[in-house]
Amino acid sequence: MKGIVILGPTAVGKTSLSIKLAKKLNTEIISADSAQVYTGMDIGTAKVELDEAQGVFHHMIDIVEPINKYNVGEYQRKVNTILKNFEKNKKNPILVGGTGLYINSVTNGLAELPQSEPNLREKLCSKKTEELYEELKKIDPSSADDIHPNNKRRVERALEVFYLTGEKFSIISKRNIKRNNFEFIKIGLERDRNNLYERINLRVDIMVEGGLIEEVKNLYNIYGENLKKINVIGYSEIIDYLKEQITLEEAIFQIKQNSRRYAKRQFTWFKNDPDVIWFDVEKISEEEILEEILKLI
């Protein structure tokens, strides 16, 4: 069966198109946004509102509390479980978002790496970084080339994987396993970079006017510094403001700047994927894009 991915940078217009497509296909949407999984973080992550969703159900939103980071492995397992129901009901899933790692985990799969082994990890941790790196150079030169000599955590992990599996980290980490039966059509949305940045700036202003500061304040009262540890744009900056480390104007400026930089990184990630079919939303209408997607399906 075929699935559709609607991807692109923040504020490019994915939500509107995906809802219209879901209604045409009588199907549901799976969010691929690493921030929208957290409960209570609504305004700052631009979650789809009830009236905006127009009755289209969205999966993978509000599934964990913002205490610990939610990782890509957990996301992949949950989504693949959801996809079994799509397959059973013969529906085309629509995966929508801008978190490239989450999207790839579903469309291309993830490498199966072993869990850490406490005794081995303790032994590796007791060694100096230089000693570990020299060990890695002998065992797995390719990994040593890819990992910075001072990145002790990654060097330790590469050695740990080798000692637990007998296989080089450089090989096993690229051996992705896809655990669903869908063939995904990837649709990328883009627009003029300056116009996108203006949309991002406007979105931030609307978030602030819509109660972002109060939302962050309430969450911070519940979760404290754990909220900042998950490092979501819009929340970290407002927390700094609430702690009187920066002014509100500085916080808003930083949110806009960090959001623009994030959009740039998203573009870089997605443009490296040769399977993405791109549409410039400033040169082609939503209806025309929808027609093209339906032809592809």
Image (cartoon, rainbow, N blue to C red):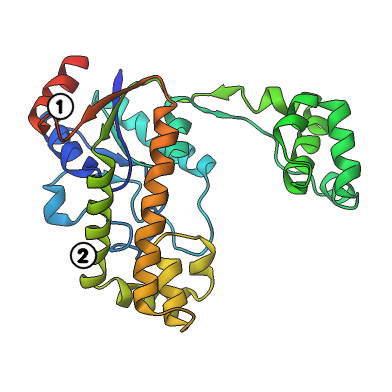
Identity of the amino acid at label 2? Answer: Ile
Task: Indicate whether 207 appears above or below 46.
Answer: below
Task: Indicate whether 84 appears above or below 253.
Answer: above
**Residue under the point 28% across and 50% down:** 197
Mark 1 element type: helix
Which quadrant: the N terminus? top left
Q: Position of residue 7 (x, y in %)?
A: 31, 35
Mark 2 element type: helix
Cα distance in 3D space between marks 2 and 1: 27 Å
Q: Quadrant of residue 237?
A: bottom left
Which residue position holds label 1? 289
Question: Which one is nearer the viewer's eye here, 183 or 214?
Answer: 214
**Residue under the point 19% across and 22% down:** 293
Q: Position of residue 275 (x, y in %)?
A: 37, 19
**Residue under the point 74% across and 46% down:** 151
| Pointers 2 and 1 in contact (C-beta within 8 Å) | no
Q: Quadrant of residue 177?
A: top right
Horizontal arrangement in the rendering, residue 132 relative to residue 278 (left or right): right
Question: Which one is nearer the viewer's eye here, 60 or 156?
Answer: 156
**Residue under the point 43% across and 57% down:** 64
Identity of the amino acid at label 1? Answer: Ile
Which residue position holds label 2? 206
Horizontal arrangement in the rendering, residue 65 relative to residue 26 (left or right): right
| Number of numbered callouts drawn | 2
**Label at residue 36:** none
**Disc 2 crowd, CA 10 A, few/some/many (<14, 14-19, 20+):** few
Which quadrant: the C terminus? top left
